[in-house]
Image: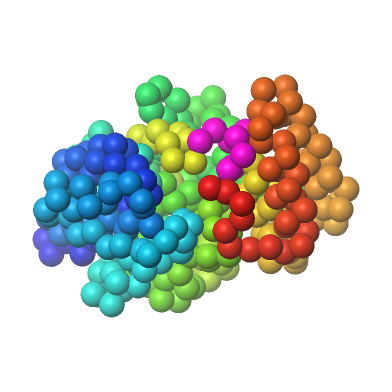
Amino acid sequence: MENPPSVTAIVLNWNNYEDTAICLKSLQTVEYPNLDILVIDNGSTDGSSERIDTEFPSVEVRYNEKNRGFAGGINPGIRQTLNEGTEFVWILNNDTQFPESDVLTRLINTMIEHPEIGVLTPLIRELPDTDTIWFWKGVVDWRTANADHVDIPTELPTGLVETEYIPNCCSLFRSSVFEEVGLLPEQYFIYYEDVDHGIRIRNADYRLVTDTRTTVYHEQGGTSGDEIQPLFSYYNGRNTLLLAKRFREKRKGTFPICFPIWTGKQIGYRVLNGGYSGILPFVRGVFDGLRECTDKGPYP
């Protein structure tokens, strides 16, 4: 590739040296001649980012004074890359790994060929079971405002797949998206900032796309834990309502009926799967969503 566009990969670390170090070692195997790597430390107290700063001299480490959540943690890095004139921003979870050394080259080529794509993700498979697909397409059910990954079809489409949102596990952005639409919304603290952002990006006439011809791995639940545990339960209950309130015009008329039914199913799911510790946090999240509480809640 002649004159490859500049790309900055941004990885967020919070008290998790092991996953972040594995991610960076894997990221350094990605063959792309114009890639910078920026680690944002989100107020860690365990010395993990100082250790990363020492052990990865080619990686820039920037420190936030406290845990500002996902969007609040990432946004200072995005602002820095925009000020530096970077053409593409590659947001990565610190538990991603890269089995294909040419993954970024192929993603960039797709972005160049399709200037209408604002955000692009590869197919994301789970670790350690790499036969299992974690994400290929996302959808928002506006009867409840719940966002979820679409079930895997019998035959996975090969090529470019339209999606309603892209989880910021491995998302490649044009810098122009942030300049036009804005940075990641910080009021959610964690979870649903990607859904909100994706809606606004699509409203600005950009496409959100998965390229199923490329693959990365993701260790599901690496930092946040299982979906029936307190942290996810609280923010899932709260942020679903925050999203519903922010985009009232998209909600179905059956929302007042369907949302309480969905809430009951979420509680039942935790009971059936032994996630008792997540029940009260989920209920508290729903009540805080009704009260329109934002930013950091009682977790972590």
Q: Residue 131 placed where, x, y %?
A: 40, 22
- Closer to the camera, 27 or 55? 55
Does the magenta portion include 228?
yes
Q: Residue 25 placed where, x, y %?
A: 19, 40
Q: Residue 119 placed where, x, y %?
A: 42, 58
Tell me where residue 95 sits by quadrant. top left
Q: Is residue 149 left or right of residue 125?
A: right
* Residue for point 57% across, 48% down: 299
Kindly give the residue lying farthest to the right in the view shown: 257
Boundaries of the magenta span: 225-232
Q: Is residue 179 above or below residue 167?
A: below
Q: Is residue 221 left or right of residue 91?
A: right
The N terminus: image quadrant: bottom left
Q: Is residue 13 above or below residue 246?
A: above
Tell me where residue 172 sits by quadrant. bottom left
- Closer to the camera, 4 or 173? 173
* Residue for point 28% across, 55% down: 39
Q: Is residue 96 left or right of residue 188?
A: left
* Residue for point 45% across, 25% down: 132
Does the magenta portion include 152?
no
- Closer to the camera, 207 or 299? 299
Q: Is residue 60 above or below residue 83?
A: above
Q: Residue 205 placed where, x, y %?
A: 52, 68
* Residue for point 86% across, 53% down: 256
